[in-house]
Image: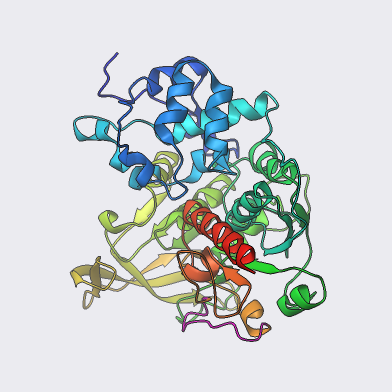
């Protein structure tokens, strides 16, 4: 065994998986997981832990795994994370825990994410559940949003003894885990629902189809329903568009709508009645993980798909693994290209897109080199469908119906990053509702911080 190289993980063949919605990565078996775990150096001052937004004791769970005690490994992870099977699949480990792994200096870092996934999957397959608190303290906390941040905060508070109720606007809990991330990256029935059931097993109640700001307000929850604190984890579900001519045409989608139809409403499954326009020639505008998800979904629905991104491959914000998988499956990339106009036929449907070539100038405020238009380089791409994957912002409904809640110019709620406290007493916020669209694990980290903040706030009352 070459300790400098990580144990390869099995995957579906690209030509096969490009036509199905089954999970791409097949994960480790026990022998492979122990072999990979044995590469961990068990550092006395592990930098990997500092790189994890929820501070999992990574060396400890790997040590238990290498002993063959997967149950003990799961118990270690469960102290810190409510969604390990999710995080093991969708976290950007390569820029977090694995980036700080000492093994990565002279070889491959330990495959921490794949090990976490193995342990979580083994626990689920063997019927393991987190231990429910022996008693509650009788104090009620409301969580708005059953996404990763809300579920994490709820789980941590339940472990502390609080009576927690999550209010979810959609008909299924899970937030971005069920409406945003495709089945081939994150299976809903086997993984997401099981993790949510684990949170419910701690005593957390989830009420769906409740729109805060319409069904009931935050003030009413606190004044009439007896909740002593509220955590806003409503995410950022309001899509952004470019503001170019033609983007209101038939055949133009936000990635949010396209992915929600496919993921939450099962449009990819012929037994469901959810309509979706797959398109024959599709352009996805953007270069993040959501753009890759939309492109790979459209590809599986039978389309010829091109990613259009105004910077170079080096600046793509998507995970390297997702870009690699997209290319393997046949997604095309048109880089250093910016749309100027969506062309529309006489019937009001997309017929193409007028674009211009770009070149990179000096870095902008994000640290990435600023794209500049090349004069005289305009051209037209023939299309019938355009998917905009340009990011999202929080829906202003909650902030506009809650007296005394301060937001910034991006409609994000202003909250203390250390404890989630806001301008309104007893109201906390975190995740995408505060930061704008970010990663699952960062939202979970905010949920953990808010749980501690809420506990300290209520204990001081």
- Start and end of the magenta stretch? 402-412
Q: Quadrant of residue 153?
A: bottom right
Q: Residue 411 lies in magenta, yes or no?
A: yes
State the quadrant of the C terminus. bottom right
| Residue 252 coordinates in the image, percent (x, y) | 56, 69
Q: Nearer the viewer, residue 335 or 368?
A: 368
- For the question of whether residue 233 can be seen, the reply is no
Kindly identify the residue that appears in the image at 53 percent across and 43 percent down: 80
Name the side, left or right, on which 77 lies relative to 51. Answer: right
Q: Nearer the viewer, residue 426 or 364?
A: 426
Q: Quadrant of the N terminus?
A: top left
* Looking at the image, residue 199 lies above or below residue 169: above
Q: Position of residue 20 (x, y in %)?
A: 59, 38
| Residue 228 relative to residue 439: left or right | right
Indicate whether 265 appears above or below 326.
below
The outermost residue toward the front is: 460
């Amino acid at each position: 065994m070459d300790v400098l190289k990580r144990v390869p993980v099995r995957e579906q063949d690209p030509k096969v998986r490009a036509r199905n919605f089954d999970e791409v990565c097949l994960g480790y078996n026990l022998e492979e997981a122990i072999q990979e775990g044995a590469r961990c150096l068990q550092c006395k001052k592990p930098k990997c832990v500092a790189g994890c937004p929820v501070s999992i004791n990574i060396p400890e769970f790997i040590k238990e795994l290498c002993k063959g005690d997967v149950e003990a490994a799961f118990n270690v992870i469960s102290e810190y994370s409510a969604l390990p099977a999710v995080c093991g699949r969708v976290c950007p480990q390569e820029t977090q825990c694995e980036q700080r792994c000492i093994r990565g200096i002279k070889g491959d870092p330990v495959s921490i994410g794949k090990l976490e996934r193995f342990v979580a999957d083994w626990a689920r397959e063997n019927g393991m559940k987190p231990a429910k608190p022996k008693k509650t303290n009788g104090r009620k906390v409301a969580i708005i949003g059953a996404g990763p941040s809300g579920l994490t905060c709820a789980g941590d508070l339940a472990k502390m003894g609080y009576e927690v109720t999550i209010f979810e606007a959609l008909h299924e809990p899970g937030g971005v885990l069920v409406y945003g991330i495709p089945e081939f990256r994150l299976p809903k029935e086997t993984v997401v629902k099981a993790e949510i059931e684990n949170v419910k097993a701690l005593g957390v109640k989830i009420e769906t189809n409740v729109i805060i700001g319409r069904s009931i307000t935050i003030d009413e929850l606190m004044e009439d329903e007896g909740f002593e604190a509220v955590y806003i984890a409503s995410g950022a579900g309001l899509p952004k568009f470019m503001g170019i001519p033609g983007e209101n045409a038939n055949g133009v989608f936000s990635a949010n709508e396209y992915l929600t139809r496919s993921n939450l409403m099962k449009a990819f499954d012929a037994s469901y009645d959810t309509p979706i326009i797959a398109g024959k020639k599709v352009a996805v505008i953007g270069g993040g993980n959501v753009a890759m998800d939309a492109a790979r979904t459209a590809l599986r629905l039978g389309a010829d798909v091109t990613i259009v991104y105004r910077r170079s491959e080096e600046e793509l914000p998507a995970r390297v693994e997702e870009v690699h998988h997209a290319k393997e499956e046949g997604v095309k990339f048109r880089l250093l290209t910016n749309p100027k106009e969506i062309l529309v036929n006489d019937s009001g449907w997309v017929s193409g897109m007028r674009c211009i070539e770009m070149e990179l100038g000096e870095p902008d405020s994000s640290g990435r080199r600023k794209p500049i238009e090349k004069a005289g380089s305009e051209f037209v791409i023939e299309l019938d469908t355009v998917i905009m994957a340009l990011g999202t912002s929080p829906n202003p409904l909650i902030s506009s119906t809650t007296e005394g809640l301060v937001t910034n110019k991006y409609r994000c709620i202003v909250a203390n990053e250390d404890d989630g406290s806001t301008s309104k007493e007893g109201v906390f916020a975190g995740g995408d509702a505060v930061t704008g669209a970010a990663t699952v694990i960062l939202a979970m980290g905010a949920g953990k911080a808010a749980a501690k903040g809420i506990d300290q706030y209520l204990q001081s009352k």
